[in-house]
Amino acid sequence: MCGIVGYVGSRSAQEVLVRGLRRLEYRGYDSAGVAVAHNGAVAVTKAEGKLDRLVGRLEEAPLPGRAGIGHTRWATHGVPSDRNAHPHRDTTGDFVVVHNGIVENFRALRDELEASGVEFRSETDTEVLAHLVAAHYDGDLKEAVRHAIARASGAYALVAMTAREPGRIVAARMISPLVVGLGRGETFLASDIPAVLDYTRRFLIVEDGEIADVTRDGAAIETIDGDPVERSPITAEWDAAAVEKGGFDHFMLKEIHEQPEVIRRTLGARMQDEVALDGLSWVEGHPSEVARIWITACGTAYHAGLVGRVLFERLARIPAEVAYAHELRYGHPLIGERSLSLAISQSGETADTLAAARLARHHGARLLALTNVVGSSLAREADDVLYIWAGPEISVASTKAYIAMLVGQSLLALWLGRARGVLSASEERKLAAELSGLPAKAASILERLDGPRRVAEHLAGAGSIYFIGRGLDHATAMEGALKLKEISYIHAEAMPAGELKHGTLALVTEGTPVVAVVTQQEVHSKMLLGLQEVKARRATVIAVAYEDDEEIGLVADHVLRIPRTADPFSPILAAIPLQLLAYHVARHLGRDIDQPRNLAKSVTVE
Ligand code: F6R
């Protein structure tokens, strides 16, 4: 949700900033801009639209200079336009800022600044910060930033630079993420580690309520009250190759193909004959104290939570709830002290998920984070962290992180089931063996790419597509519908298969595509009956089913086959053909697959 990058050193700042923005573009692509300090002035170039428009302008008129800041925007206040693109300046033009997040009291601040004669050039909340920094400047940029953020409420990260102190950048983190990259004689700032992985793997994480004072020699971090902070750098595990497309046409396709390896990594050392969880100190010490699990997440991570809820109840017999984070926050939930709050988030930065996790903790729950990003806000706030090790996910539509979230929860459910005496050692071993077999089975699905591609051609002209399933298959249907919607822009709706006849069947007519996920044996015959009803309305049925399921072929028009596995783990495999289906429909329609309209990867605003 907006990407920020900063650089001070001896390279061309413009080059470093553009490369960093390219890596951050998944965070927003409504506009992009850079500001570079040179010869006692700061020059700004910006452009509405994708980064390439900015690059075009910079090619025509390059900005010389060795220090600068850049931004890629996901619009919150003000339409996407050149005027509203960051960086924003004060009226003298000497001060520039970029910002990620929302200044909640910007209206009052703007009124106050306008009353004192300041003329605004944009509709953004960010511009107030440029004017506030300038107004408070008395020879020290850090103090000016400190005063500015004391006036601005909200969740955001701010980076400021001034022509009067070239070679210095000051950044503040008020919730929204910010990291400092440490090089030799050069220092970087970014919203996210991948932005500057080409240059360094050593990072300082700026914590909430801290200010980083950055020069080419490094960064001094202090609290907003001015207390110095000692922070040791972390080393990023990811390398630059992990954030390249690696020969695939899209990041999404690359990430789908990485899934067998991702499953293997998530299982990793945690899976021998039985499950061993690494570093979950509280959960490991108190498995029988967990009276209820509260799962909270948004979007695809929420769909992973739908699967988790069933796994925890089925395999560990622990009552579990799953709630959208933005609903849980305002829903007066009855979370008690013996609750485990499981917050799921690929980025670990989703504002609603963080807030819901904090609420659960406030009610006395222990917080377990299931996340992909080491050092993310969620990871740092949690009592325990189960990392999913999916590697950097660049495509806005999440695929491999979803699969890894399912694997992570499967491990946790097995471990809890065993620790609480619900599963016998032999049951655990049998299920653990099933999990170990999943990478090869996922790989075999990726060898049959023709099916999804062919079915996609039929679906590309549809106005609406229905996704149905029962139990765990319903969760997979939800995820399949979301994937299709977000990248193809075709309307899709998922529901439990049994619900269709209670209203929505009225919309099913000749040729209406109905995608049915049919893997759960307990409800297999019920699914077939339901599909007969759908066929009776002459719908086109596309099924995702086990390869040895012969009955499904009698009702479905097209079947996307997956290898058989234990039913609790079938969502891990069944999601893959649906990801491919969404991909190929979007591709057929010529959509912008990795950067679908109106979306951004990491939603750090409410
Ligand atoms: C959909 C998608 C989103 C995210 C959601 C939560 O493909 O990626 O729905 O799942 O915004 O993001 P995280 O997992 O980072 O909290």
Image (cartoon, rainbow, N blue to C red):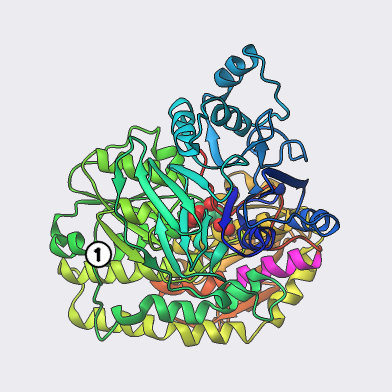
Considering depth in this image, is 427 or 325 the residue closer to the camera? 325
Residue 87: image quadrant is: top right
Say above or below: 100 vs 368. Answer: above
Residue 356 colored in magenta in the image:
no
Asked where in the image residue 20 lies, by quadrant, the reply is bottom right
Residue 328's spot in the image, x, y percent? 39, 39
Q: Residue at left 50%, top 29%?
A: 138
Amino acid type shown at disc 1 = Ala
Q: Could you say which is closer to the camera, residue 37 or residue 568?
A: 37
- Residue 584 within the magenta-colored segment of the rendering: yes
Residue 262 location, x and y as percent? 47, 77
Disc 1 Cβ-to-ligand 1 distance below 8 Å: no
The residue depicted at 32 percent of the width and 54 percent of the height is 380
Residue 427 shows in this picture: yes
Q: Is most of the magenta stretch helix, strand or loop? A: helix
Identity of the residue drawn at 44% across and 77% down: 263
Q: Which residue is mark 1?
A: 316
- Left or right, 446 with respect to 342, comes to right
Mark 1 lies on a secondary structure that is helix
Q: Which residues are magenta?
A: 577-588
The x and y percentages for residue 305 are: 41, 57
Asked which quadrant contains residue 468, the reply is bottom right
Residue at point 75%, 47% (across, down): 45
Q: Is residue 306 visible?
A: no
